[in-house]
Image: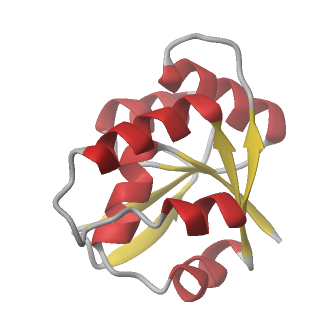
Amino acid sequence: MGDVLIDACGWVALIDGSFNIDLALSKIVGPPHFILIDLVLEELEEIEENRPRGKNLMLDLLLQRSTLVEHKAMHTDDALLEIANEQNIPLLTVDANLKRRSLENGIGILEVVKGKNIRLINVL
């Protein structure tokens, strides 16, 4: 099973891209299993509150398919980098700064490209 750490903007991009999540990620990491930290869940809940009706983020699906990890209060990006490094798992994100920091620290990233493709990047 392919563990994937979820960043809020990465999940939004995945949902907005209308991907078949299992099919898209299975080709890259194997059957996906999501790691979701409470800080990211809070961000996603806030984003969903402000989205138009009918454009939900499928948070029920995410929670069903995830292991929820509580993390001490800190900047979400720092927490994501810490967990990705500790567990040696890729991070799903489209945030340019977070991608740069991840790659500088040897952490692989899964990124949604132009809303059409997903790719794994392991090096700068």
77 vs 34: above or below: above
Residue 59, position as x, y percentages in the image: 51, 59
Q: Which residue is drawn at 57% across and 89% down?
A: 23
Q: Residue at x 76, y 36 (%)?
A: 69
Q: Residue at x 47, y 27 (%)?
A: 101
Residue 114, position as x, y percentages in the image: 22, 68
Q: Nearer the viewer, residue 37 or 86?
A: 37
Q: Please identify the residue farthest to the left as the structure is shown.
A: 52
Residue 45 lies in what quarter of the image? top left
Residue 115 lies in what quarter of the image? bottom left
Residue 15, position as x, y percentages in the image: 37, 69
10 vs 40: above or below: below
The colour scheme applied to this rendered structure is secondary structure
Residue 13 lies in what quarter of the image? bottom left
Q: Nearer the viewer, residue 34 or 118?
A: 34
Q: Is residue 124 left or right of residue 122?
A: left
Q: In this view, does 116 lie to the left or right of 81?
A: left
Residue 103, position as x, y percentages in the image: 52, 37
Q: Residue at x 65, y 58 (%)?
A: 63
- Locate the N terminus and report the quarter of the image it occupies: bottom right
Q: Which of 124 and 42 is in front in this view?
A: 42
Number of callouts: 0
